[in-house]
């Protein structure tokens, strides 16, 4: 297991090792179900629109798992079973680990055009106080800042010293950036794109979405 979300869970470990399954009839209310649902919602935040991560392996979760197998694992429609098997756990674990890595990547703070050296010194002192650090400069006004929870701390400076704080989960760029600064920030965000990170983890990852899932026959398999 690579993700903090899945690591140490005995049911998920057993499924990964192909010794067990998760389905409506197997471990349907085990804590592992909530973890699977959480990872599915990282993959597609809209995949569980009615119940979300409620810890119950019902029809909505089974349908999301079936779609995940088709779109993410490339399983042919006629071979899909709407339960959780080893490949499903393996890929969801990768997706959760990528998301955790993106969260740990920090954020980019963008100084306001009117910010003075004294203003920025105050921001830098605050970063130091909470255990953060400047990781990489991006042009004259922007810098990648590493550290847990820093985006929330720096948000307090937006509108005065900073013109914006950019994170992988909130990639909105400040409107006052010049063209070169926009390119630098977009490049940083692109290196953290989930699809890119997953492709690096698994070069054989499918690049297409399979159609016709509604008509597939759910038959036993080991995915």
Image (cartoon, rainbow, N blue to C red):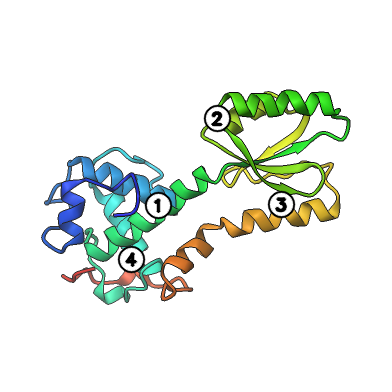
- The kind of secondary structure element at disc 4 is helix
Choose top left, top right, bottom left or bottom right for residue 220.
bottom left
Which x, y percent locates residue 175? 81, 42
Quarter of the image that includes the N terminus: bottom left
The residue carrying mark 2 is: 131
Frontmost of labels 2 and 1 is 2
Camera-side residue of 117 and 24: 117
The numbered disc on residue 197 is none
Task: Measure the C-alpha gap from mark 2 to mark 3.
Answer: 23 Å
Dot 2 or dot 4: first in sequence order is: 4
Q: Secondary structure at mark 3?
A: helix
Task: Report, in whole angstroms, how far the alpha carbon at label 4 lies from the one at label 3.
Answer: 33 Å
Instruction: Indicate the quadrant where residue 62 lies.
Output: bottom left
Tell whether 214 sits left or right of 158: left
- Where does the image place residue 108, in percent across and percent down from the top left? 67, 42
- N-terminal of the pair, mark 3 or mark 1, is 1
**What residue would you read off at disc 1?**
97
């Amino acid at each position: 297991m690579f993700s903090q979300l899945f690591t140490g869970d005995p049911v998920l470990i057993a499924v990964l090792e192909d010794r067990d399954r998760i389905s409506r009839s197997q471990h349907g209310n085990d804590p592992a179900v909530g973890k699977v649902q959480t990872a599915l919602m990282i993959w597609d935040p809209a995949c569980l629109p009615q119940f979300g991560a409620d810890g119950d392996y019902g029809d909505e979760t089974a349908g999301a798992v079936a779609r995940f197998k088709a779109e993410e694992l490339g399983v042919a429609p006629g071979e899909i079973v709407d339960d959780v098997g080893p490949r499903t756990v393996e890929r969801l674990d990768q997706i959760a680990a990528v998301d955790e890595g993106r969260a740990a990547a920090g954020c980019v703070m963008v100084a306001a055009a009117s910010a003075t050296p004294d203003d920025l010194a105050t921001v830098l002192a605050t970063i130091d106080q909470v255990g953060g650090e400047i990781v990489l400069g991006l042009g004259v006004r922007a810098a990648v800042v590493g550290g847990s929870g820093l985006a929330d701390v720096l948000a307090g400076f937006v509108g005065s010293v900073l013109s914006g704080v950019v994170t992988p989960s909130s990639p909105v760029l400040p409107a006052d950036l010049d063209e070169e600064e926009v390119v630098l920030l977009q490049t940083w965000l692109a290196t953290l794109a989930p699809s890119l990170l997953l492709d690096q983890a698994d070069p054989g990852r499918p690049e297409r979405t399979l159609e016709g899932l509604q008509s597939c026959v759910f038959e036993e398999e080991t995915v």
